């Protein structure tokens, strides 16, 4: 509530807890919002507001997991489960639906967009002399996914290719990591400073402070993005920002 008030959304949010407990806007109020909505944008819930959003004039799906999302939808169709119906489908995978791309389009017209970022909420901070290159990531955010006899993994697969990077740099490298099977000792033995990813991202303020104190970010893409060449970084596996 405090955070959303900070960005001008005081009294304009609703969280439904398991057991149908409404926080923020009530069920009646949220239904009224949908009733008068010109547009409903689904940025990851993918069906959680399916019944309520039917009242909106226009419904849009934005996919932030290109390749993974399309494979999941493909598996649903095989199981006879209908694909959620929206007026438009967008993805930030720039190559999804392009001829030659291995990701299944599942009969949908995928339009493309990048997630917008409001840089005004990240005030520039003076660079500290001892600042380090950082990244915040999940080692495995979900299990590998299979499509047409091939397995597609997560960041853990791609990060293995860069384990020895700290030994090649004159600046310290830090990884704030969470998820299953994190090889903490292996990372440290290769020169990485390791932090708890959940602690760094416990609040928006802690996450913002972590970014402001960083010299820059080194990051890897998920293996499914790389091997399917979804378009995040073409066929490259990593990037300095």
Image (spheres, grey):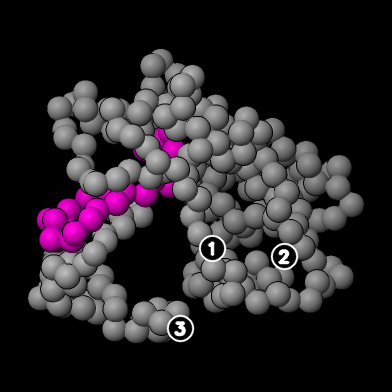
Neighbourhood count class around disc 2 (C-alpha, 10 Å): few under 14, some 14–19, many 20 upward = some
Image coords of residue 171 (percent x, y): 85, 55
**Residue mark closest to the camera, 1 vs 3:** 1
CA–CA distance in space, label 1 to label 3: 16 Å
Q: Residue furthest left?
A: 28
For label 1, the crowd category at 10 Å Cα-Cα, with few meaning under 14, some 14 to 19 and many 20 or more, is few
Instruction: Give the mark, 1 or 3, whose residue is nearer the N terminus.
Output: 3
Using the rendered image of the protein, determine whether residue 120 is visible from the camera's viewpoint: yes
Residue 4, percent across and down? 40, 78
Q: Earlier in the sequence, mark 1 or mark 2?
A: 1
Pointer 3 or 2: first along the chain = 3
Image quadrant for the N terminus? bottom left
Q: Is residue 226 magenta?
A: no
Could you say which quadrant of the image residue 211 lies in? bottom right
Is the residue 126 above or below the residue 103 in the image? below
- Work out how far the residue at label 3 is from the one at label 2, CA to CA, in angstroms: 23 Å
Look at 49% across and 19% down and name the residue there.
100
Residue 53 colored in magenta in the image? yes
Name the residue tied to disc 1: 117
Q: Which mark is residue 6?
A: 3
Residue at image x 48%, y 39%?
93
Residue at x 69% of width, y 44% of height = 239
Q: Nearer the viewer, mark 1 or mark 2?
A: 1
Which residues make up the magenta segment? 46-69
Position of 198 relative to 80 (above/below):
below
Given contact means CB atoms under 8 Å apart, are the residues at marks 1 and 2 in contact?
no
In terms of secondary structure, where does tag 2 sit?
A: loop
């Amino acid at each position: 509530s405090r955070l959303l008030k900070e960005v001008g959304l005081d009294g304009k949010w609703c969280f439904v807890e398991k057991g149908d407990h409404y926080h923020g806007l009530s069920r009646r109020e949220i239904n009224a919002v949908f009733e008068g909505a010109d547009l409903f944008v689904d940025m990851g819930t993918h069906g959680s507001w399916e019944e309520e959003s039917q009242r909106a004039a226009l419904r849009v799906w934005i996919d932030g997991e290109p390749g993974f999302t399309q494979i999941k939808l493909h598996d649903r169709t095989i199981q006879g489960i209908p694909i959620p119906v929206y007026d438009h489908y967008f993805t930030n995978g720039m190559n999804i639906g392009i001829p030659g791309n291995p990701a299944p389009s599942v009969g949908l017209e995928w339009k493309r967009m990048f997630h917008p970022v409001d840089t005004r909420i990240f005030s520039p901070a003076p660079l500290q002399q001892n600042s380090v290159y950082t990244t915040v990531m999940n080692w495995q955010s979900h299990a590998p996914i299979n499509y047409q006899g091939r397995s597609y993994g997560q960041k853990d697969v791609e990060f293995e290719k860069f384990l020895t990077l700290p030994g090649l740099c004159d600046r310290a490298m830090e990884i704030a990591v969470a998820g299953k099977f994190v090889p903490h000792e292996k990372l440290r033995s290769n020169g990485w400073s390791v932090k708890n990813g959940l602690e760094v991202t416990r609040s928006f303020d802690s996450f913002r402070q972590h970014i402001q104190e960083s010299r820059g970010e080194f990051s890897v893409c998920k293996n499914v993005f790389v091997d399917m060449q979804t378009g995040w970084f073409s066929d490259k596996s990593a990037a300095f920002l």
